[in-house]
Each structure stands twice: as structure tokens, then as C-alpha cells.
Image (cartoon, grey):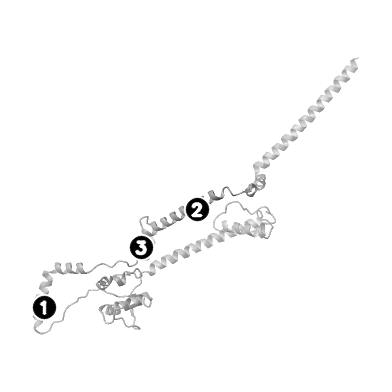
Amino acid sequence: MWLLDSFFNGQEFPASPLRGPVEGMWWAFVTMTTLGYGDRVPRGIHSKLFGIVWITCGLVIIALVMSFITTSLTMDIIKSDIPVYGSKVSAIDDSPEFRLGIRLNALMDRERRYTTLEDLYKSLNDRHVDGALIDSYTVSSRKELFSDGKLRMSKMISYPSAYGVVMAGSARKLQKCFREFLKEERASVFKIITENVQGVTGLQKDNADKTEGLFDAESPVYIKAVTWCGGSLAVLTVICLVYELLTRKTRNPNPRRYEYSDYLEYINKQKPLYKYTNSKETMKKILTDFHKTAASGWRILKRNIEENYDSWRV
């Protein structure tokens, strides 16, 4: 814009190679997505056409950037739910979870041997696998290992299974007794499970829940963001006030530094009302001078006529 309009609009886009490009860059920045602030306006026809093209390109670029950001966030949320099918999964060797992964067509990791929960945690933490199949009761029994906030529970897979005891010989006669006992004492069994099994805390939330929490006024993320922003604003305000009080007496401001009377006078002269007022004053002055001249000539002519009339009578 500086190259196109500096010849027609030297007041706003100076021909100086130092000030001119700076003004052109400012105009390009403020008009990239809006119509600008009006402090810099192109005058030439070709400059205005370039401005139309520039604003249109800016709107398209901003729309593409916003769509890219939206798509990235959406894909991040969608990818948060990793399916077991076709994913690289780890599990304790020869465990029911290992056999469940095979039944679900998961790519079970056979490069390493997993014999302990620490091995599973290390593979997840190193991102060697996409996920791990672990019994929910087992996870709750090792809260110190899975509650550090680095892992996320993707889904709960319903897989009916049972833990029992193999009986042989005469002990098989106790099978019926054990079954009857479990039926009658089912409430006691669930009470024991409830007392010995605890929920796992510290696992990360889904990305969708995190995104929703950003716009919730009661969410910790929102409260923390508002608190930090408010605190930072208060600190900056106090610093600026203290600086103003300390330097007010020592400063020697230059009144001409912020003097824009010449520029404002130039702008006012471009307004139609100014041109109308100026023309009106000019015509009024011409008419006043004509009236004075005519009145003065009429008085002289009248005096000459009276003198000639008196001479004729004599």
C-alpha cells in the first residue's frame, strides 16, 4: 500500500523509506480482518482496489486458520477414545485380560514380557503401547501406581469372569455347600468387596470433559484462569500507578510531542462542510466589499450632483 499510495497520499503514507513502510505495515495489519480504524485510508483508485483484495484475502485466511484450529480440537477429542480393535495393547502374560485382548482383535504386544503391573505402567508411560487391559479390581488395589495423573481410563469393558477353586476327590462334595453358602451370604460377600475395593482417583479426564470445563464458571480451570488474570492485572495496575507517582515530578513533557493540530487541520479541510463554509465566507466577504465600494461611489456621485445643482442655480 505504501508503494501504491505514497504518490497520491503523502500525508498518510510518507515517501520516507523509514516511516512509509511502517505506516503501510500498520494499515495492512489493522485491515487484515476488519475495515481498519480509519486513520490510514487509500486515495488512489488502484490503491483502493488493492485494499479490497487485501481485506478479502485476510478474511479467507482467518477463516482457514479458525477452521484448522476447530478441526484440530475436534480430532483430538475424537482420538481420545482409542478402540481396542487394531491398537497395540499390553496385558499381563497368560492372564484373562490377555486372552480378552486376543478375542477383541487387539495387537497384543509380544515384544516385551509383562509379569507385573509395574511393567504395564512403564510401557504406558513410555508410550510403547496405545493402552493396557487391566482388571478394575487390580487397578484399585494399586492406587499409588495408577493415580499419578499421567494415565487416563479410556473405557470400561464388560467381561463376565469368575475366580474359583479347583476341587478334586472327596472335596467335590463340598461344591454344593459352597454354592448354597454364596447364595445365602451374597450380601456379606458384596459388603466385603465394598470394604476392600476402593475407587481410583487421579486419572485424567477425557478431552471432551476438559474442553467443556473451560467454559464452566465453576470449573477449577476457569477459576484458576480468572484468578491469575485478575491478579496479574491488579499487580500491573499497582506498578503503573507507583511509576506514575514517582516520575510525575521529574518528567518534563514536551507539549508539542502530542500536537496534531496541523494534521487535524488538514483533515478538516477535506470535509465538505469545511469547503461549504469556506466558500460561504469568501462570497460573503466579496459581497461586503462590493457593498462598501458601491456605497462609497454612490455618496461621491450624490455629492457631485448636489454641487453641480447649486452651481446651476447660482
* Mark closer to the chain start, 3 or 1: 1
- Residue nearer the viewer, 216 or 157: 216
* SS type, badge 1: helix
| Residue under label 2 | 239
Amino acid type indicated by mark 3? Asp
Q: Which mark lies nearer to you, 1 or 2?
A: 2
* SS type, badge 3: helix
- Residue nearer the viewer, 135 or 36: 135
Mark 3, other Cα within 10 Å: few <14 / some 14–19 / many ≥20: few
Q: Residue at x 11, y 75 (%)?
A: 178
* Image disc number at residue 167: none
Q: Does residue 31 appear in this view?
A: no
Check contact, mark 3 vs mark 1: CB within 8 A: no
Q: Does residue 206 appear in this view?
A: yes
Q: Residue at x 44, y 63 (%)?
A: 70
277 versus 112 height, above or below = above
| Horizontal and vertical percent position of residue 155 | 31, 70
| Residue under label 3 | 209
Quarter holding residue 196: bottom left
Amino acid type indicated by mark 2? Ile
| Horizontal and vertical percent position of residue 142 | 27, 72
Mark 1, other Cα within 10 Å: few <14 / some 14–19 / many ≥20: few
* Mark closer to the chain start, 1 or 2: 1
Q: Quadrant of the N terminus?
A: bottom right
Q: Residue furthest top?
A: 314
| Residue under label 1 | 175
Q: Which mark lies nearer to you, 3 or 2?
A: 2
| Horizontal and vertical percent position of residue 172 | 10, 81
